[in-house]
């Protein structure tokens, strides 16, 4: 049986990928996750014990990572690297864990896959490319120069550069992907869409940063997972693939849609203090992934995916309610 080591597999997207891999293939998955505030081990309950195990630990722990990577000895075995500090607002408050996990942690993983000659897929973000003007006809491609804005996106850019250097200088067998904004179940309530849904469910107000003209390119986490699997199977070593599903929406439109879908007046939200250095627009051109690897997203409609996500949060109060008060208190302290 093929074996995968999935870092950050207890997080929002990593756990989605673990389910995808176990449901669609016969691989064995070991998750390595430090179980930070952002983790949801609940998302991994009820997985088959003979094909799945969870190791609680840090990707920057060289010895642990070396031991786990050293167990991957079959030809199809691989590391899929999701673990990261992932929230821009947190990186503005305290960049330190972003440098440690996203850069030093990725370095530790690269040294282990180099030593043991194991295939790696590195998961990254479209934010490494900076932002676009609202009327720019170009979208991000694999050739767009890096221009990250926040400590989070700069740390992810640094990690991407390390991966490419290890490919070129040491012959590490790695692929990379840069994906647009994900939504779906198990996303932490600090993030935009879950924050607004749970604000409404908890009887609070929806909070839009600044004018809300900022555009994000939304993709369902299940489509991100299927794209990563496709790259793992068919991707060319050393290549980068951009993952996106043509889902550009302004934040203002998303806020109005959430309110409408939840039976509220679409104008019933507050404008709050804008994010420092707030990127204006992200947009992915996924042509390479679609034409070279034949990937297509399965979630055709953002409205439908959002409606199902709202239903999911309404049905999983036990999971998010304990996280809500602390998250909102931190936002309130910043006027957000
Ligand atoms: P998340 O914050 O929900 O989950 C991150 C996971 O990594 C958590 O389970 C956490 O416990 C774990 N982790 C953090 N530090 C660790 C460490 N030092 N050692 C081991 N585990 C550690 O993040 P997410 O939204 O699921 O993002 C996953 C990956 O996808 C990240 O690399 C992120 O940059 C990338 N990405 C996210 C999005 C998005 O919209 N969320 C878009 C594109 C790319
Ligand atoms: O309350 C809010 N109000 C608001 O208007 C929050 C939390 C956010 N926003 C805005 C900021 C962004 O323009 O919504 C947009 C989305 O915000 P986030 O959910 O924080 O996502 P973003 O900063 O775009 O980054 C996300 O996508 C790329 C993920 O968090 C990253 O991990 C990923 O790399």
Image (cartoon, helix red, strand yellow):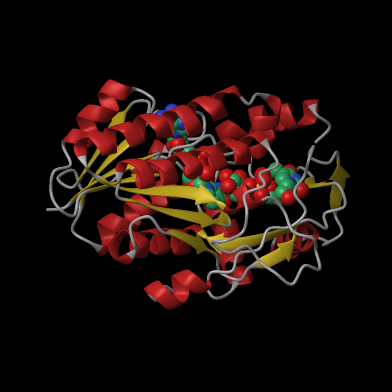
Whether residue 54 can be seen here:
no
Give the total number of marks visible in the rendering: 0
Relative to residue 35, is residue 191 drawn left or right? right
Indicate the position of residue 154 as horizontal and vertical percent values: 61, 38
Q: Nearer the viewer, residue 308 or 57?
A: 57
Relative to residue 330, is residue 60 drawn left or right? left
Q: Nearer the viewer, residue 83 or 208?
A: 83
Residue projecting furthest to the front: 169
Q: Quadrant of residue 222?
A: bottom left
Relative to residue 44, is residue 151 drawn left or right? right
Where's the C terminus, which quadrant? top right
Q: Is residue 229 above or below residue 109?
A: below
Whether residue 4 can be seen here:
yes
Indicate the position of residue 326 as horizontal and vertical percent values: 65, 27
Indicate the position of residue 324 as horizontal and vertical percent values: 63, 34
Q: Is residue 195 above or below residue 240?
A: above
Residue at screen point 34% across, 22% down: 61
Indicate the position of residue 314 as horizontal and vertical percent values: 58, 52
Residue at screen point 69% across, 35% down: 89
Q: Quadrant of residue 87?
A: top right
Q: Is residue 159 above or below residue 27?
A: above
Residue at screen point 33% across, 57% down: 237
């Amino acid at each position: 049986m093929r074996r995968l080591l999935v870092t950050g597999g207890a997080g929002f997207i990593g756990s989605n990928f673990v389910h995808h891999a176990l449901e669609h293939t016969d691989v064995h998955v070991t998750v390595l996750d430090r179980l930070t505030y952002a983790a949801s081990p609940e998302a991994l309950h009820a997985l088959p014990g003979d094909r799945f195990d969870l190791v609680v630990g840090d990707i920057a722990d060289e010895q642990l990572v070396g031991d786990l990577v050293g167990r991957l000895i079959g030809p199809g075995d691989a590391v899929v690297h999701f673990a990261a500090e992932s929230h821009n607002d947190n990186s503005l408050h305290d960049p330190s864990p972003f440098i440690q996990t996203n850069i030093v942690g990725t370095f530790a993983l690269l040294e282990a896959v180099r030593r043991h000659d194991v295939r790696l897929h590195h998961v990254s973000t479209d934010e490494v490319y900076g932002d676009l003007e609202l009327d720019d006809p170009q979208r991000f491609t694999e050739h767009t120069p890096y221009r990250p804005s926040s400590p989070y996106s700069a740390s992810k850019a640094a990690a991407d550069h390390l991966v490419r250097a290890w490919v070129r200088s040491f012959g590490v067998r790695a692929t990379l992907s840069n994906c647009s904004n994900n939504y779906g179940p198990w996303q932490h309530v600090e993030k935009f869409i879950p924050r607004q849904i749970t604000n409404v469910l908890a009887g609070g107000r929806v909070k839009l940063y600044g004018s809300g003209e900022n555009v994000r390119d939304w993709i369902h986490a299940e489509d991100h997972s299927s794209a990563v699997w496709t790259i793992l199977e068919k991707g060319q070593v050393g290549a980068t693939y951009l993952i996106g599903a043509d889902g550009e929406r302004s934040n203002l439109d998303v806020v109005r849609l959430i309110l409408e879908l939840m039976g509220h007046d679409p104008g019933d939200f507050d404008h709050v203090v804008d994010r420092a250095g707030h990127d204006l627009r992200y947009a992915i051109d996924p042509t390479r992934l679609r034409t070279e690897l034949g990937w297509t997203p399965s979630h055709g409609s953002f409205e439908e995916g959002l409606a199902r996500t709202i239903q999911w949060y309404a049905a999983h109060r036990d999971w998010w309610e304990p996280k809500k008060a602390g998250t909102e208190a931190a936002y309130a302290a910043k006027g957000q």
